[in-house]
Image: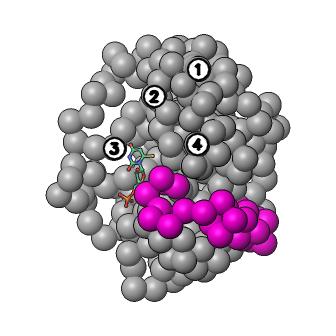
Amino acid sequence: EEKKRLSYEQKLEVAEHSFAKKILKIAIEKRSNLIASADFITTKELLDFADIVGPHIVALKTHIDILNDFDADETILPLKNLATKHNFLLMEDRKFADIGNTQDLQFSYGTYKISNWADLVTSHVIGGSKSLDCFVNVGVVAILGMSSQGTLTDSHYREEAMKVIENHPNIIGCVAQNQISDNLLLFTPGVNLGTTGDDKGQQYNSPEHVIKNYNTDFIIVGRGIYKADEPEQEAVRYKNEGWKAYEASL
Ligand code: S5P
């Protein structure tokens, strides 16, 4: 018989990292496995979007460095308030990829001071295990495999990356396009119900495909929601599709 996935409740029982517990609790409470990617270049669009989709998501994924008008008081304070109001986590998709000392500086200093506000951060593991020691008071989501055409994250890379990932206590899960072991959370981007890709190498699957085939815990949807005419309606649609596929896979 085919091996079934663990439920969010079962994952919560064995989760050790505080941010793994937090995101699992939110998923259970909201009956949602949806993370919305908010790839906006203005603070107003980012905040309006967060307020609209907030009730339906477990986390809002940001690329904070693409904002034209970033300001700690005008951007981060209201964003944190919205995260509290609607009970979602803030996931900064920084994709760190350097030595430990540089990542330490990039995490806490400069314009964005990510460590002040992010609950989750994405990081490559290409710098090796010790490069990840700097990520304290945050959950690290490691980039195992990418969704883009021609990515270098082939099976050999992923096998070596997984050795780092499985042994690092700061890591709560992976971004990947394949099934991984039950003790890590799986986050899958490249999800869209309307199209199979873009002209810059992105490749898409449906929520059902990634949840059924990879046992993904959280789907990450960007343009499918934020470019829609009715982003809230679309967020609800992805949330419902994602939850239905999760329940069917139990
Ligand atoms: O492999 C990846 C990893 C990530 S985090 N492929 C991705 O697309 N992402 C991110 O997910 C990407 O940076 C973007 O913010 C989001 C996908 O956006 P969409 O508009 O293509 O859905």
Q: Residues within 10 Å of mark 4 (few under 14, many from 20)?
A: few
Separation of residues labelled 1 and 4 (CA atoms)? 14 Å
Q: Height in image: 54 above or below 71?
A: below
User: Residue 72, how many percent across, how many down?
Assistant: 66, 60
Name the secondary structure under disc 2. loop
Residue that mark 3 sits on: 147
Instruction: Identify which amino acid the numbered label 3 is placed on.
Output: Ser
Q: Relative to 111, is 40 above or below?
A: below
Residue 101 image label: 1
Q: Main secondary structure of the magenta part?
A: helix
Label 4, secondary structure: give it. Answer: loop
Closer mark to the observer between disc 2 and disc 3: 2
Between disc 4 and disc 2, whose residue precedes?
2
- Label 3 SS: loop
Q: Identify the residue at image location x=39%, y=85%.
A: 229
Kindly tell me whether mark 3's CB lies below 8 Å from ligand 1: yes
Q: Residue at x 27, y 27 (%)?
A: 152
- Circle 2 sits on which residue? 97
Q: Residue at x 44, y 14 (%)?
A: 160
Depth check, mark 2 against mark 1: the one in front is 1
Disc nearer the start of the sequence (3/4): 4
C-alpha gap between disc 4 and disc 2: 17 Å
* Distance between the alpha carbons at the discs numbered 2 and 1: 11 Å
Residue indicated by mark 4: 110
Left or right of 175, for residue 12: right
* Magenta-tinted stretch: 63-88
Mark 3 or 1, closer to the camera:
1
User: Depth check: 245 or 106 in front?
Assistant: 106
Instruction: Select label 3 or label 4 by which is in front.
Output: 4
